[in-house]
Image (tube, helix red, strand yellow):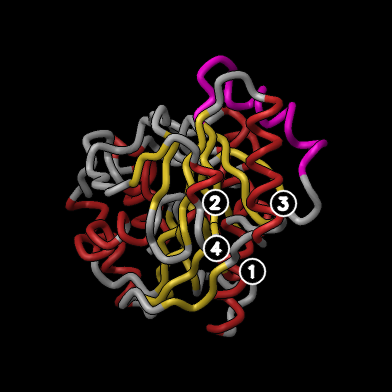
């Protein structure tokens, strides 16, 4: 790895944002300093693009965004670079499997065209700044009428990690189930994660993984931790994330991103 990274990728919730959903001025200033050094800046998040734009604009200088945990990669103007949808058969069979094996599960589809189709009883704990205009229906599987990027699973009677444990060995070919970064597991096409999205950006920019630093706090960040030359866990991170990190920053409410970036600069 070079002495100074060429690409830096930041998770949003629990990493860049404070618990109240704001970007600290110190964090914004530190990231702007990276931009002045010519670094490629990426937001890498489980959020859909429409829920990323406010953060990207507030921070400034963002070059790319990995959205929906790798299912979509966009440029700084929202231009679509890549998207990974499930086939119609994968979409249907994976959701039916969840319905059959998980008691009381409710489903929510993130559509490739930006729509959201939710079971009537789907509930969530999205960040406060989310403003999702979802269509609620009696049966999301029947209502899906186009390519699906992800299924979110509202597991009302089981812990999310237990649901993943149940579904993982039974997933239809070409699909997988994994943590979403929220309290809901998600189903996606196989191999879709934050690392795959960052690898695509790195290839476009001619940057090796060893010259990338990544910052995160959740289980959906583990793949990019394994990909990058240096991984930084926030002090508020999940214990498994802390265990895998090369560096540990102060928490998101203590401007941890800025602390590490300032030391790097």
The percent position of residue 71, horizontal first and vertical second, equals: 55, 61
Q: Earlier in the sequence, mark 3 or mark 1?
A: 3
Q: Can residue 39 be seen in the rendering of this structure?
A: no
Q: Which residue is mark 3?
A: 175
Q: Which residue is mark 1?
A: 209
Q: Which residue is mark 4?
A: 147
The percent position of residue 264, horizontal first and vertical second, equals: 42, 60
How far, Cα to Cα, is label 3 from label 1?
A: 25 Å
Q: State the residue at coordinates (50%, 74%).
A: 6
Is residue 124 a member of the stretch shown in magenta?
no
Give the position of the C terminus as an image quadrant: bottom left
User: Considering only vertical position in the picture, is 180 above or below 37?
Assistant: above
Q: Which residues are magenta?
A: 154-171
User: Considering only vertical position in the picture, is 71 above or below 100?
Assistant: below
Q: Earlier in the sequence, mark 3 or mark 4?
A: 4
User: Considering only vertical position in the picture, is 126 above or below 172?
Assistant: above
């Amino acid at each position: 790895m070079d002495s100074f990274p060429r690409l830096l990728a930041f998770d949003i919730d629990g990493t860049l944002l404070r618990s109240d959903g704001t970007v600290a001025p110190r964090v914004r200033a530190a990231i702007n300093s990276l931009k002045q050094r010519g670094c490629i800046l990426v937001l890498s998040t489980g959020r859909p693009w429409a829920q990323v734009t406010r953060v990207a604009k507030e921070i400034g200088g963002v070059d790319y965004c990995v959205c929906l945990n790798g299912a979509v990669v966009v440029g700084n103007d929202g231009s679509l670079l890549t998207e990974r949808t499930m086939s119609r058969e994968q979409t249907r069979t994976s959701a039916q499997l969840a319905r059959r094996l998980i008691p009381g599960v409710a489903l929510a589809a993130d559509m490739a065209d930006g729509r959201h189709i939710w079971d009537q009883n789907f509930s969530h704990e999205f960040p406060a700044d989310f403003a999702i205009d979802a269509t609620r229906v009696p049966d999301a599987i029947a209502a899906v009428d186009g390519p699906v990027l992800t299924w979110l699973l509202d597991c009302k009677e089981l812990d999310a990690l237990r649901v993943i444990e149940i579904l993982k060995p039974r997933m239809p070919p070409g699909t997988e189930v994994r943590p979403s970064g929220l309290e809901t597991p998600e189903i996606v096409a196989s191999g879709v994660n934050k690392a795959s999205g960052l690898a695509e950006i790195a290839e476009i920019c001619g940057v090796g993984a060893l010259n990338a630093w990544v910052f995160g706090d959740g289980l959906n960040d583990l793949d990019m931790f394994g990909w990058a030359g240096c991984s930084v866990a926030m002090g508020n991170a999940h214990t498994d994330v802390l265990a895998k990190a090369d560096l540990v920053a102060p928490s998101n409410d203590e401007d941890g991103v800025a602390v590490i970036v300032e030391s790097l600069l």
